[in-house]
Image (cartoon, coloured by chain):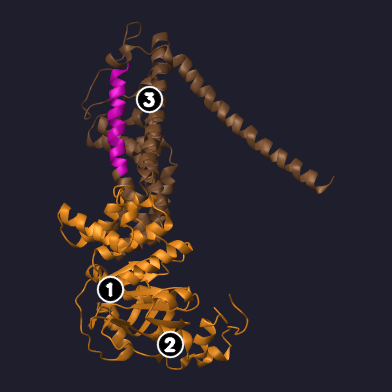
Chain colours: A brown, B orange
Amino acid sequence: MDRALRRKLTNGVFVGACGLATIIALAALVLILWSLVKEGVGGIDANIFTMTQPAPGSPGGLKNAITGSIMMCASGMAIAIVIGILAGTWLAEYGGQTPYGHAVRFLNDVLLSAPSILIGLFVYEIMVAHLFGHFSGYAGALALALLAVPIVTRTTEDMLALQPNTLREAGMALGAGRGFVIRSIIWKAASAGLLTGGLLGFARISGETAPLLFTSLGNQFFSLNMAQPMASLPTTIFQFALSAYDDWRRLAWVGALLIAVAVLAVNTIGRLLARETHRP
Amino acid sequence: MNDIATPISPASPNIAASTEAPIMTRPVGELVLEARQLDFAYGKTQSLFGVDLPVERNRITALIGPSGCGKSTLLRALNRIYDMYPGQHATGRVLLNGEDILSDRGSVARLKARDGDVVLNDSGLDTSALRARIGMVFQKPTPFPMSIYDNVAFGVRLHQKKSKAEMDVIVERSLKRAALWDEVKDKLSASGLGLSGGQQQRLCVARGIAVEPEVLLLDEPASALDPVSTAKLEATLMELKKDFTIVIVTHNLQQAARISDHTGFMFLGKMIEFRPTAELFERPQSPRTRDYVTGRFG
């Protein structure tokens, strides 16, 4: 076989294999989304957003779970973004090359892949078992924050490291201090990347069930009090999907669809915002 | 570029002879900035050896020499921008209007260890105040991710409180002096990142002069620009020397010859020859300078 033909064949086989792998991955994704939409859309009505979870057989919705999820995710992300961005900035701009910096980075990478159930147990032990003495929305928010912090930290460090040193020098050459240069120039230049870190963190925690079972537990009534047990979509799905009642299982599908749509929407809006602010 | 005519190797007799005293013709006018016997080290690697550089007020001083000869290092020592990297040290004296700016404890200790008891005339400037008086423009354009207006106002806001009206005047004047006003006056609120490379570099010049420094340091400012943008930048610099003193590092010998009043030729971390530009290019005295400006090596 001459060389040109052999190259052509090898190329064809490789490209074919890549294409096949892509199709398999996409097919799984499409199937998941398809079943979500098929099973979930039918159950969406006004009650979903206006009524709390029902007893089997009576009408109801997911108002308590939706509110709880929003409150715990939002406060978890607020904590994670503050700590993660500051920690990532410290790693990238100040202490990243010191022995302590290396240790922090290593532990952060370990946390990045830590099983979420361990995080749940950890927060349970500290806040539920000792500090509060009962399940609470605060404990749930803290568990979610601990899951998102390593993601935000890692992304922040990577994105800041991408910024050219000449940009820092240019700021300092005008007489600005190092901290001011980071806050007013480097963070701005890396804003799209920092946002990506936040979105990745949000995507990670929005569907987490295990840590919430140990911390916020769940609550069949509507509650805005984060000091008390709090409902959330993932725990409600967990409870309803395993039940024997058709109407509960339908609500579980609706909840799953809502989470998927929320993650998709937040991601899309984030990307659009990043593109808008970065357009020259 | 290495033309083989004068092969460079550590064993070359040319290098061994480099302990000879530099050929210096000091400017007759007033010096605004001066480096005296300046050493510089990146960690353990010394890259400047006892360099003298007199910079005359309202003139353009060019630094030429092959890559790695220490031109940029010398420039970076003049506004202490190296300070942000631990392990980089300048030892020697740098005088701004006769006052020492290398007067922090570490620099003074190193100088005394080298030269014995030296009496300094401390300027008392911290790095922030120093850099307001000695501005810098880099090789690659570095517009900040903000509007053209905010780019120019950035440095001014660091040092002074100005009203919106006063700031408008400063921004307009700086952009006019940098010959960029006509191209951007209708889009001051657009991002500085959207400008072309040449415009971005003139924006950086405008940003640098907005704080009214005495000296503007330029590190190969035209090496990333096309010939048209380069010509515009050079015209801008010629205009700017009425109000500012300029030190420019360049790899482009024609550029040094076109715009500068004094030229220093550096080689292996030493100042070989510092003279008025026309003399240095037409009658170089050091054989190494002659080889370099005639393109025999570089």
For mark 1, does the 10 Å Cα neighbourhood hold few (<14), some (14 to 19), or many (20 or more) residues?
Answer: few
Mark 2 vs mark 3: give the one in front.
2
Task: Identify the mark at residue A15; answer none if there is no mark.
Answer: none
Specify the subunit that label 3 lies on.
Answer: A
Q: Which residue has dot 2 on it? A: B279
Q: Which residue has dot 3 on it? A: A234
Residue B287, percent across and down?
52, 90
Q: Which residues are magenta?
A: A61-81
C-alpha gap between disc 3 and disc 1: 70 Å
Quadrant position of residue B57: bottom left
Q: Secondary structure at mark 3?
A: helix
Which quadrant is the N terminus of chain B positioned in? Answer: bottom right
CB within 8 Å, label 3 to label 1:
no
Q: Secondary structure at mark 1?
A: loop
Residue A106, percent across and down?
43, 52
**Residue at horizontal 46 percent and vertical 14 percent from the top:** A39
Q: Is residue B275 above or below residue A117?
A: below
Q: Which residue has dot 1 on it? A: B242
Q: Do discs 1 and 2 share a chain? A: yes
Residue A192 lies in the magenta-colored region:
no
Residue farthest to the top?
A57
What amino acid does circle 2 point to? Answer: Glu
**Looking at this view, is A202 or A134 the one in front?**
A202
Residue A79 lies in the magenta-colored region:
yes
Q: Is residue B28 left or right of residue B66?
A: left
